Amino acid sequence: MEAEQIEIAEFLGRFPPFSYLPENTRQRVACSIEIGYYRENTDIFTFGEEIHDLCVVRSGAVEIYRRNGNLYNRLSEGDVFGQLGLLMSNRVRLPARAMEDSLIYFVPEAMFTELCDEYEAFAYYVEVDDHRMLNKVVDDQRDSDALSSEKVSSLIARSLVTIPIGATIRDAALRMTEESVSSLLIVEEYPPYEDGGDSRIDLVGILTDRDLRTRVVSQGVDLSAPVVNVMTRNPKTIDKETYIFEAMLMMLRFNLHHLPVIERGQPIGVIAISDIVRYESKSSLYIVGLIHRQQNRNELALVSKDVPDCFVRMVRQGSSAHMIGSAMSVIGQSFKQRLLELAEEELGPPPVEYCYLALGSMARDEQLLITDQDNALILSDDYIASQHGAYFESLAAFVSDGLNECGYPYCTGRIMATNPRWRKTVSEWRTCFSDWIDVPNPDALLNCSIFFDLEGVWGRNDWAEELNKFIVGRAQNSSKFLASLARNALLRTPPLGFFKEFVMEQDGGHRRTINLKRRGTAPLADLIRVHAFAVGSTARNSFERLDDVIEAGILPDKRGLDLKNALEYLAMVRIHHQVEDIELGEEPDNTIEPDTLSDHERRNLKEAFGVLSNSQRFLKYRYPFSK
Amino acid sequence: MGRSRSDFNWHQYLASKLEEDLPQSVMSFYRNQPFNESLTLGAAEYVALDFETTGLDPEKDDIISIGLVPFSLNRIKVAQAKHWLVRPSCSLSEESVVIHGITDSELTDAPTLLDVMDEVLLALEGKVVVVHHEFIEREFLYHSIKEHLNIELLFPMIDTMAIEALQHRKGWRNTLKKLLNLRLPSIRLADSRARYGLPRYQLHSSVTDAIATAELLQAQVRYLYSEQALLSGIWR
């Protein structure tokens, strides 16, 4: 009479991939196994040995090694190993050793093969190696995310309302009333070509309710005047294939309420902010609006208290890390812009033109909740320190103090516009960056992750763009600089993974906590920056940089996608962790304790770390350092 | 119980059994006894055996469940584990139902020990029988077979509890503790297993306990003996 193995089946049921199996199948697996006991510090499998079982750690701890003897993984209760050997010619690829007294369950090969054949989830778990597993998780997240998966075209609710270029203001207003629309596109129509085809219309401008109020009525403009006189000429447009969240960001950034949607150069509709509001919570848009309406620093500080809630709301709605990072950066930028406006009101107009720069994560649109303020000033070449110095010192202090009050603490490294070192003229900045790039000494590179990501937020933002182009152009052509930057990007390495309540280091050491920014997202951003400069990408955002890098084809096949997924996943875990902190009423931070992670998260994090680690190795090879 | 002491002369006993007129299954079981002086721990084939009984008195109580699992020092062959429910001649006491969770109604259709004896002996044949607390398995088997067939069925066993007692209850400290009536280290199955880092099992059935016993012996050998050690040193 065959014995039922309920104890074993129940154990297996607690862990993937066996938890994916139906109960009666699990019972059959339980009845098929063999069991072995291994004393601490004894080999379970050595390299090249034959293997015919999938191994499950029932109790104890097992270490898996690479062929060169480096630790690859440490396993505990419920973890499986040996699948690689089973799938590849029945030879042990990664030797296994009991690190504590361990009891191992052996699932015979025939059963293993049957399970792989019959149960996709099981096969997926054991067959897929690291990064592909991660891809699936990120894909699943993306699927559930309407804002980032839906295109702008899905927001177009009604047919296009236009008026020809020759119309008067009155014609336009009547048409808007007839159609009950708040915006109207002014177009030039071309008849079909003689050899057939459709007629074509070109977008010339846009007129909104607000324009009628501010440019017509309040100015007393004659209603029979041509509409072209009061419309916004060549308005910003968006392609119908764009994701909704990008449209949202564009509207936020340029403070637009209406955005014409284009298909193959032809306008096909208009989306209004209210259309997006139906998708996105009002929160991030609302806060940005609020920021621009506050009248002094105290009021701004009050508004800043709502930022964490807005962040939590976005996360709950399933926004992607890219979207959340962008929204938080836009909010941060708005604080800066409003503070600068207030500063200029208080101090009077600036004596020379300037550009206020956001640096680091804000410039990359990757800001989360806890970010130091990193900023600097580009001053006009007409700047004369003795005459204008005091003004910009006061301006910088006003903004930095205000930002500090709004929850963006002072930068401990003093990378702030209040520091006279970081108030330079256009030419001085060029010289400064040239020096850094041409003579990449450790000091210069120390702050490269901050200075080399810059974005203008106020004033002559075109100077920031030019400076950025200058930097990328020069960096791209300096293999010495790229090599130094690459070497610098290898300074912070990811951990190997997790073991029980510990973080496992590559050298086998443990620690209790891990800073996901320092050990995950920051080294990834560093690494992506090197590739981005190498291909001459002027993008700042890591995802956008990756797109450029992938397009340039310098990465091994699929590696770019792996990097994207790893970045998205690491950032998401950071974000979710901060949300948990906020919900617990704690100060959000970037430090996580492994015992708060689910098995699922541990696995995926480990895979993301693996992608980072592999990519760091590639970086070393791609940008070799020679003296 | 002279027959369970380690100085019992099993050579002589087993030789004498071969002279007796025994049923074929019993004869075959004795003829294939693995017991010989040169057999090492590493070379032996084992089978872990566990009974559930209606009580603790082998003369009054009966076996109601038999579980066994064959194994070597490296692998416990769960796929070959076997389990029988056995109908007792006495009825079940309430307290024993609490312990093993087997009720009368489950046993009314079960075969008797005599019905399954040949199968059980076949599963044990040629293998070193391993139990935890030899008294139960040895005495219950002895009395049941004696009662029904008037055959004396005795054979050497390895007792993981005796190994544990030898390790953890010897020495002057423990002798002193005994004299002073202090608690000695527990040698119950679960407690013994814990000393070797073996997991605690939630469910108790004769098969689970047989597997637990097999795991314990594997651990004990890894800790206390070598694969080259002679089996004759530990069996009783």
Image (spheres, rainbow, N blue to C red):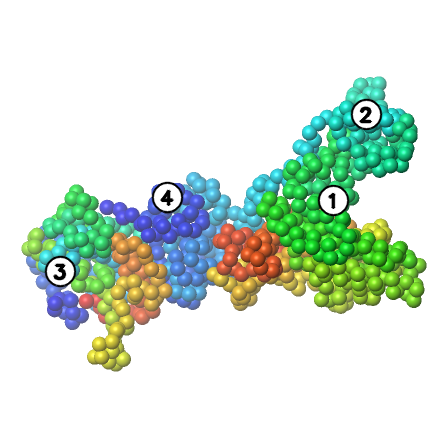
- Residue at mark 2: A174
- At horizontal 31% and vertical 52% (from top left) the residue drawn is B78
- On what subunit does the disc labeled 4 rest? A
> What residue type is disc 3 on?
Asp
1 and 3 marks on the same chain: no
1 and 4 marks on the same chain: yes
Residue A252's label in the rendered image is: 1
Quarter of the image with the C terminus of chain A is bottom right
- Check whether the beta carbons of the residues at disc 2 and disc 3 lie within 8 A of each other: no
The local secondary structure at tag 4 comes to helix
Say if A411 sits above or below A157 in the image. Answer: below
2 and 4 marks on the same chain: yes
- Residue at mark 3: B57
Can you tell which quarter of the image residue A626 is in?
bottom right
Q: Position of residue A54 (x, y in %)?
A: 42, 52
Sequence-wise first label, 1 or 4: 4
Distance from Cα at disc 4 to Cα at disc 3? 39 Å
- Check whether the beta carbons of the residues at disc 1 and disc 2 lie within 8 A of each other: no
Sequence-wise first label, 1 or 2: 2
Marks 2 and 4: which is nearer the front? 2
> What residue type is disc 1 on?
Leu
- Check whether the beta carbons of the residues at disc 1 and disc 4 lie within 8 A of each other: no
Marks 2 and 3: which is nearer the front? 2
1 and 2 marks on the same chain: yes
- On what subunit does the disc labeled 2 rest? A
